[in-house]
Amino acid sequence: MKNYIMKNIKKYLIIGVVLLGVGILSTYIYRWEYRKPALDVYFFSLNKGRAIFIRTPQNKTILVGGGQNSEIIRELTKVMPFYKRKIDYLVLPSAVPAQIGGLIEVVDRYEIDNVIMPKVMATSTVLNILVKNINKKKIHIEEVEKGDSIEVENGLVFDVLFPRADYKFNKTSLPELGLSISYGAAGVFLTGNLSKTIQKDIANQLEVKTDQNLVEFYNSGGESKVSDDLIKKIKPKFTFTTKEKTVHFVSEGEGWERE
């Protein structure tokens, strides 16, 4: 009788543990798949390089840059569920290894639907390897320039601010992708490592669509690298560089909340 009771207790304990595990897993999946529609933007703090992860209101995933090495994989696992191995849009901002080196491993490990890169771009060994791997996997590549727009989903649009084909580049003003993202009244301006001269050029032709804006600069901690013309034109709510920790902003299409 005692053995029978012990077996039943063990059986119910196992059932309880399984049910608890299923409940936790269901909650985990539900929070990703059925959360309230919002735009999440993560500015990763990497030891080397720049990377930005975006989760759209309809749960599409976008990765802008990938840092210099595989540490981007660690950061992605923090913000994506373990069962999701898909990036809808992979954006190559420039040929600089500090911005795209980590994408070699991302392309190897993740399912990529689309790759976006500028039509005007410098060259590098890292870029050559990355593009070769992208082509090997037969991933669609879309080359963009100033004036192009990409509707990621209904209500969320990428506008290409730079490069433009007729711009006269030099050693201090290298080709790099400048992007703006608009979702309702919320906007994000990704200026990356664009020179102050290029920022000013963008400001002179920029039409600001939103009034609740974030502006990101990479390696631009010094005021001398930030164009006053661009800041005055955008009038951002937040302007920052990522240094000590990952920065996470959320918007439901109105203002921004820093998580």
Image (cartoon, grey):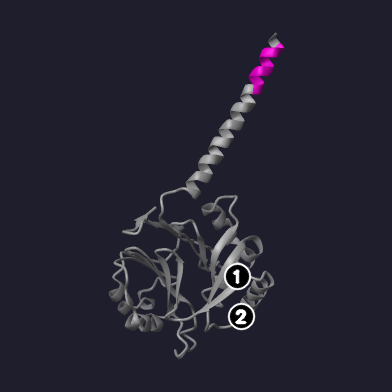
The reply to whether discs 2 and 1 touch (Cβ–Cβ < 8 Å) is: no
Q: Main secondary structure of the magenta part?
A: helix
Q: Is residue 37 above or below residue 96?
A: above
Q: Is residue 190 visible?
A: no
Q: Quick check: 171 above or below 19?
A: below
Quarter of the N terminus within the rendering: top right
Coordinates of residue 73 in the picture (x, y in percent): 59, 59
Q: Which residues are magenta?
A: 3-11
The residue at which mark 1 appears reads as 101
The residue that mark 2 highlights is 124
User: What is the quadrant of residue 74 in the picture?
Assistant: bottom right
Q: Nearer the viewer, residue 51 or 135?
A: 135
**At 70% from the left edge and 13% from the top edge, which residue is drawn?**
4
Counting other residues with Cα less than 10 Å from the Cα at mark 2, is it few (<14), some (14-19), or many (20 or more)? few
Name the kind of residue labelled 2 in the image: Ser
- Is disc 1 placed on a helix, strand or loop? loop
**Which amino acid type corresponds to the residue marked 1 in the rendered image?**
Gly
Quarter of the image for residue 241 reads bottom left
Cα gap from disc 2 to disc 1, whole angstroms: 10 Å
